[in-house]
């Protein structure tokens, strides 16, 4: 168009309306801006209230923003390319990739897998990111049952890609969701009791299969079935899960935070709130300052605990604990000739703490946690799990009027309580930025367990 005159077929000309002021920008409508403007209107049929991601803000991209504003679409303007969740109607076709473990203690490898469509009460989710919990290491070693091959992972956040016929209106394609370890029907005797989060209708899944006894995942090419991890398998580009084990999440919540809240940090945060519950002005000891332990510290502080003692052999965890509300720190390696329970008693006038929380899964520490609590009054909450499922209790530790209670997901009810935590995080009442220390791509998942051994590691985010 550098020539002042051009010959063109009349049929492809568009007369201009006289009302269009000037002519400086009209030429842009002959291609670029109109291409962008039309795509959400005619190609994707973007509807009011939906969310849109635009890659590239040239004339075409800005044209897309123009129609998005007209239709009142929420724009993900603060997302990076790897973060973008909505796929604008794209559905899953063919195979994809996931982290697979084929035998107990075996190598974890990224393989091509097939994820079937969701059945009646199920949803298929495009994972945006996932994270790593200590339990995932145990899973790769056969916990809770040696079911292989399996896809690990139970923490994550994703976008609903498709739903079964009986799902609507609970969730719909495009909704941001996190997976849940346990459900909450609200009608069974346990749910109605108000004293537990163990739902009788939607319990934690241990057999690696869906409710109908089958798997939705298989090895591409061979068709060999792959077992799920608990109710889900988040270390996969896509996964299928029963709709009663997902929770919608406000897009205002950062994706890493949403992932961490789907298990570890929420498990810790809930224990002093729902399981103990910790009383205002009381004393607390926390064994193990990983994500769960840091959650316990944060939860105890929110409950008004006056003294919160953190215990960890990693000196770098002292700063992390302080960031979440810890008042005192014990590194047992600095006191090789003294028991941890005695160190805690020394810090509490010889009495011990009101509440202790065992978050490591290290068997001998259970008795230490018990004996660190007050005789006749102390409560110990057992959170940490281990591959070895049996532990030996000391009679003097438990018989002197102390209380021992086990905990799953911190006693949090997934539909009644978890949304409260999510909202507090959105409101910045709970700060989680200190948790994220490392990020990896799914294809580098084999490096994850090495990273977890680093002294500065707290949470690893897996990006897809």
Image (cartoon, rainbow, N blue to C red):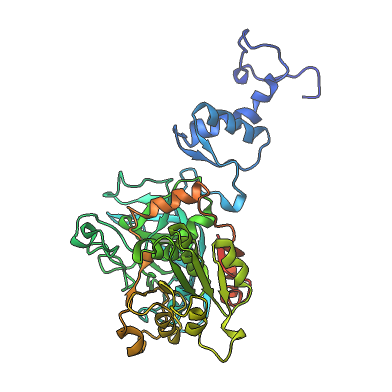
* Name of the residue lying farthest toward the left: 189
* Name of the residue lying farthest toward the bottom: 337
User: Splitting the image into 4 quarters, where does residue 27 fall?
Assistant: top right
- Where 374 falls versus 172 (above or below)? below
Could you tell whether 394 is left or right of 343 in the image? left
Q: Where is residue 162 in the image (x, y as percent from the top left)?
A: 38, 50
The residue at the point 75 percent across, 19 percent down is: 6
Task: Please tell me how many numbered marks the rendered image carries.
Answer: 0
Report the front residue among 38 and 84. 84
Q: Where is residue 464 in the image (x, y as percent from the top left)?
A: 55, 59
The residue at the point 40 percent across, 46 percent down is: 173
Q: Position of residue 210 (x, y in %)?
A: 30, 66
Q: Quadrant of the N terminus?
A: top right
User: Splitting the image into 4 quarters, where does residue 119 fall?
Assistant: bottom left
- Where 262 falls versus 398 (above or below)? above
Report the front residue among 176 and 109. 176
Q: Position of residue 125 (x, y in %)?
A: 42, 55
- Where 28 falls versus 125 (above or below)? above
Could you tell whether 248 is left or right of 99 in the image? left
Could you tell whether 75 is left or right of 141 in the image? right
Is residue 243 visible to us here? Answer: yes
Is residue 98 visible to us here? Answer: no
The residue at the point 44 percent across, 87 percent down is: 364
* Name of the residue lying farthest toward the right: 3
């Amino acid at each position: 168009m550098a020539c002042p005159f051009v010959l063109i077929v009349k049929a492809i000309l568009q007369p201009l309306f006289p009302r269009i002021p000037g002519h400086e920008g009209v030429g842009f409508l002959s291609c670029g801006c109109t291409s962008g403007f039309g795509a959400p209107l005619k190609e994707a049929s973007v509807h009011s209230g939906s969310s849109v991601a635009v890659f590239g803000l040239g004339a075409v991209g800005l044209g897309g923003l123009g129609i998005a504003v007209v239709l009142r679409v929420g724009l993900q303007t603060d997302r990076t390319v790897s973060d973008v969740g909505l796929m604008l109607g794209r559905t899953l076709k063919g195979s994809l990739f996931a982290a697979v473990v084929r035998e107990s203690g075996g190598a974890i490898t990224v393989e091509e897998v097939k994820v079937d469509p969701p059945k009646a009460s199920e949803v298929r989710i495009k994972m945006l990111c996932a994270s790593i919990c200590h339990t995932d290491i145990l899973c790769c070693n056969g916990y809770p049952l040696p079911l292989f091959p399996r896809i690990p992972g139970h923490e994550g956040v994703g976008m609903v890609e498709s739903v079964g016929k009986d799902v609507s209106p609970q969730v719909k394609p495009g909704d941001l969701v996190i997976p849940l370890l346990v459900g909450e029907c609200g009608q069974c005797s346990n749910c109605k009791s108000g004293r537990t989060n163990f739902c009788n209708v939607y319990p934690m899944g241990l057999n690696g299969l869906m409710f109908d006894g089958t798997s939705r995942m298989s090895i591409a090419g061979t068709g060999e079935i792959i077992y799920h991890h608990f109710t889900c398998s988040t270390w996969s580009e896509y996964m299928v899960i029963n709709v009663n084990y997902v929770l919608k999440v406000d897009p205002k919540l950062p994706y890493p935070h949403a992932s961490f809240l789907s298990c570890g940090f929420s498990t810790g945060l809930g224990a002093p709130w729902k399981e103990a519950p910790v009383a205002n002005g009381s004393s607390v000891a926390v064994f193990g300052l990983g994500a769960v332990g840091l959650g316990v510290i944060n939860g105890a502080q929110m409950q008004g605990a006056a003294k919160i003692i953190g215990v960890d052999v990693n000196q770098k965890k002292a700063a992390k604990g302080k960031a979440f509300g810890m008042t005192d720190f014990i590194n047992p390696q600095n006191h090789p000739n003294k028991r941890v329970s005695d160190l805690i008693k020394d810090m509490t006038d010889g009495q011990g703490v009101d509440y202790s929380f065992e978050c490591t899964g290290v068997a001998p520490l259970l008795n230490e946690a018990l004996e660190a609590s007050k005789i006749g009054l102390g409560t110990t909450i057992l959170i940490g799990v281990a591959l070895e499922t049996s532990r030996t209790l000391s009679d003097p530790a438990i018989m002197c009027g102390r209380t021992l209670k086990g905990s799953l997901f911190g006693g949090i009810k997934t539909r009644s309580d978890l949304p409260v935590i999510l909202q507090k995080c959105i409101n910045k009442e709970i700060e989680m930025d200190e948790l994220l220390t490392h990020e990896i791509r799914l294809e580098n998942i084999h490096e994850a367990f090495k990273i977890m051994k680093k002294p500065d590691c707290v949470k690893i985010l897996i990006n897809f």
